[in-house]
Amino acid sequence: MSDTMLAVVLDAWGTSPVLREVPVPQPAAGGVLLRVTAAGMCHSDLHVADAPPGRLPFEPPFVLGHEVAGTVVEVGVEVDPAWIGRPVVVHGVWGCGECRRCRQGRENYCLERGPRIGNGLGHDGGLAEFMAVPSPRHLVPADGLDPVVAAPLTDAALTAFHALKPHVETLDDASRVLVVGAGGLGHFAVQLVAATAATVVVVDPKPEARELAATLGADVVHPGLDDVARSLHRAADRFDLVLDFVGATPTMLGSLELLALGGHVVVVGGAGGELTVGKNLGLPQGWSVSAPFWGPRDDLQAVVDLARAGSLHAHTETFALPDALTAYARLRAGDIRGRAVVVPGDPRD
Ligand SMILES: [Zn+2]
Ligand SMILES: [Zn+2]
């Protein structure tokens, strides 16, 4: 095996990622080395690259890529060699495994994680030929799944699942759910909401995204929140739940204004929007808003199981690793349908 590999590196805040040769990582004593079979590209990678110094708690340089499927090719001395050869996906929030949140199965809110979140977010990620993972605790076996489908489950599907999960029990056949943005995350959310009894309304300015949402189970699609507002004729048309996969000020404010009494907005997208919170803003009584972060490992296991059962489909466009920067440009231009996934291909053994 060569000592170096091709990787997509963020060298400094506010710069474009670059494609260059870096050393192949070694597994730690308690960790594993993966040959990356597929790595999803996320809008949050662009938010990370664009961030000014000091906004995020971790520091460049690091290899991007927080949605990773791979095959275990090496293990550290403390790790069961039975892992070697297994296809896996990586739970990208590397919780400590011991604090009270981790013990509750809420590793995404680990209290001892430190400034770096996980692969591609402070630690070296999977937009590369190989990636080291510090513990098999962060792996979920992905046997039987196409890696191109499996990689986007780790963030795009997991985050959508975790955003919806606390509300699923409240949804019945009279409930109305609005999904704002039917891209990488939103297209999974449409499928998850469509599996409940609720009516699913989707808003996305892009015709291809609306078309995809309709094929995935959306009952109604609209190009803009204004169009949604104009379609509300009765109180019963208002929304019990809005999942905002954009998270810009206009989508967050627009979502609040469409709520039914006691309705809830989940802000998932990280576009930097802001809301003013107060009790006398003229909003429907009992409104609430939350901003969940990613999801725990158990929820990743759940979305892997759904995908294996054929209940969750990933719509992807694939790119070779040398074309990763082109893929980011297309993502930035809003020109990707579903998820962009990089397939590193054969390593140069
Ligand atoms: Zn992401
Ligand atoms: Zn922890």
Image (cartoon, rainbow, N blue to C red):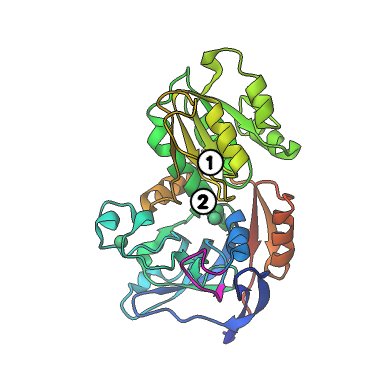
Q: The magenta stretch spans which residues?
A: 53-62
Mark identifier at residue 312: 1
Number of residues whose C-alpha sits closer than 10 Å to that of mark 1, classed few (under 14), some (14–19) or many (20 or more) = many
Q: In this rendering, is residue 156 above or below 69?
A: above
Relative to 257, is 297 on the left or the right? left
Q: Which of marks 1 and 2 is nearer the N terminus?
A: 2
Magenta stretch: includes residue 217: no
Q: In this figure, which residue is indicated by the disc labeled 2?
A: 153
Judging depth in this view, the residue of 82 and 164 nearest the camera is 164
Q: Residue 57 carries which label?
A: none
Q: Is residue 60 magenta?
A: yes
Q: Name the spot of residue 76 as percent of width and height, x first.
A: 37, 79
Residues under numbered marks 1 and 2 in contact, where contact means CB atoms less than 8 Å apart? yes
Left or right: residue 275 compared with residue 205: left
- Residue 299 appears in the figure: yes
Residue at (70, 55) in percent of width and height? 332
Residue type for callout 2: Leu
Q: What residue is shown at x 49% (from left), y 40% (from top)? A: 276
